[in-house]
Image (cartoon, rainbow, N blue to C red):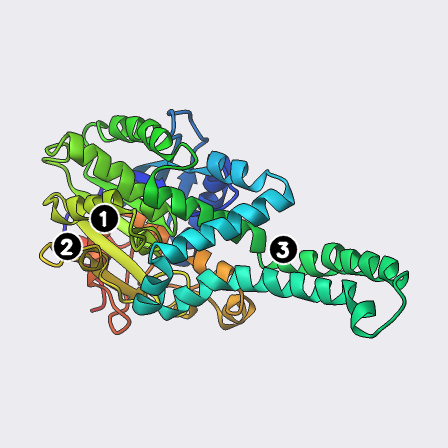
Amino acid sequence: MNRIKKRVVLHFPGFEPLDAAAHRARYERSARQSAAVWNFSASVDELKNFGRAPYFDVVAAAADWQTQSRVHIVDHNDLVAALNGRPFFIRLLNGYLAAARVALSGGMVGYFRHAWRFGLFFIFPFLLMLCGLAISLSIAFAPFLFGLPSWSHIGSIALAVAFFVYVFLPQAEKLHTLHLFSDWEMAVAMAGLNRLAAEQWLEASALSVRQALEEPDVDEFVISSHSMGSSVATHVIGLLLEREPGLLQGKQVVFMTLGSAILQCALMRPASVLRARVGLIARCREIFWLDIHCLTDAIHFYKAKVAAVCGHPDAEQASILFVRFKQMLTAQHYAKIKRDFLRVHRQYVLGPDVKAFFDFTLMTAGPLPTSHFAEFSLKKMPELTFNSGDEAQALSIGR
């Protein structure tokens, strides 16, 4: 097996309030964890400007190998900040309007059909907010219900407002409820390309990605995406392939989707462009599509064949790699996070506590071709001996 000496990574993060600098800091922390677990060194350089895709360089090395990776962060934090920065009632109203659009466009039915847990994830923040509003209204109208004098409404209304603002909302925000409202606005925008100036934003991102793909003497290009970022990545790469079908000719490209939420957008009827771009990627001979799934992550479409669901059953389907986060974390660490569904969903891009066959740092900065990780499984754990002088032994997996 050839080792990777130079790699370019184009990473599309999920819907999080983090800019490129914050994603770089997260990557550095994760790389430090991975390096300690696998006994290699990892140096992460400072962030450098590159239009919509700023980058940092990573040098990972052991006794007999060294890999240089340039990691571009194609984040959409400006859109996240704009959505989250509006007044409360605007976010509340627009969130429910987005939910209505998802339901009316067939998205909700598709969620329960293809991944019922994702369907529950969809309705959760909206039901939770309705419960909070219902309790507040019950407090406000309690005097009427119990036949109390009208003047007592003054106190009950004040108590209802206090409950909603000082009790319910702080607890709801621990579950990122309003952030999830904005997430569904983003999903609607990525589906129909008619909100948030989505088309213009994707055009600007595509220019930077196109330039990054011109990097010379690269052994492997990895287009990695997490959660909502997978829909963004599909749009950007699909847009480039629409315009230049031969863009990736002669390149070794891996499209790695982590906890992918492409179907979050693609299952809505207006998402015809997104579904077509899924087909372009699936049929591109230069692209190896590796789809990472985890049973304990409710915020993705577990076991779903994305290309087929998007109307391309005849195209080559993504290779699905099933992972278990409990096998890359200590028992204490996993017990701490397993009930926080958003924290579990982030684990795809975070560092390991112990050696495991799935490791985001190894896949984006290590010496093995990223496509090789598709061969791993729960029954075929890796034995990576990075400091061995014997290449066959150094790169052996699951002997």
Q: Earlier in the sequence, mark 1 or mark 2?
A: 1
Closer to the camera in the image, 333 or 210: 210
Question: In the image, is residue 137 above or below residue 23?
Answer: below
> Which numbered dot is residue 180?
none
What residue is drawn where x is 90% and y is 60%? Answer: 151
Residue 239 screen position, x and y as percent: 23, 35
Badge 1 marks a residue whose secondary structure is: helix
Closer to the camera in the image, 332 or 387: 332
The answer to which image quadrant residue 168 occupies is bottom right
Position of 132 with respect to 205 (left or right) is right
Q: Amino acid at mark 2?
A: His
Question: In the image, is residue 129 above or below residue 242?
Answer: below
Residue 200 screen position, x and y as percent: 35, 28
Q: Which residue is mark 3?
A: 173
- What is the C-alpha distance between the residues marked 1 and 3? 33 Å
Mark 2 neighbour density, 10 Å: few (under 14) some (14–19) many (20 or more): some
What residue is drawn where x is 53% and y is 69%? Answer: 339
Q: Amino acid at mark 3?
A: Glu
Dot in front, 1 or 3: 1
Kindly check if marks 1 and 2 are in contact, taking CB atoms under 8 A apart as contact: yes
Position of 359 with respect to 149 (left or right) is left
Q: Earlier in the sequence, mark 3 or mark 2?
A: 3
What residue is drawn where x is 39% and y is 49%? Answer: 228
Position of 57 with respect to 169 (left or right) is left
The answer to which image quadrant residue 399 occupies is bottom left
Q: Earlier in the sequence, mark 1 or mark 3?
A: 3
The answer to which image quadrant residue 213 occupies is top left
- What is the C-alpha distance between the residues marked 1 and 2? 9 Å
Closer to the camera in the image, 386 or 297: 297
> Which numbered dot is residue 312?
2
> Which numbered dot is residue 275?
1
Mark 1 neighbour density, 10 Å: few (under 14) some (14–19) many (20 or more): many
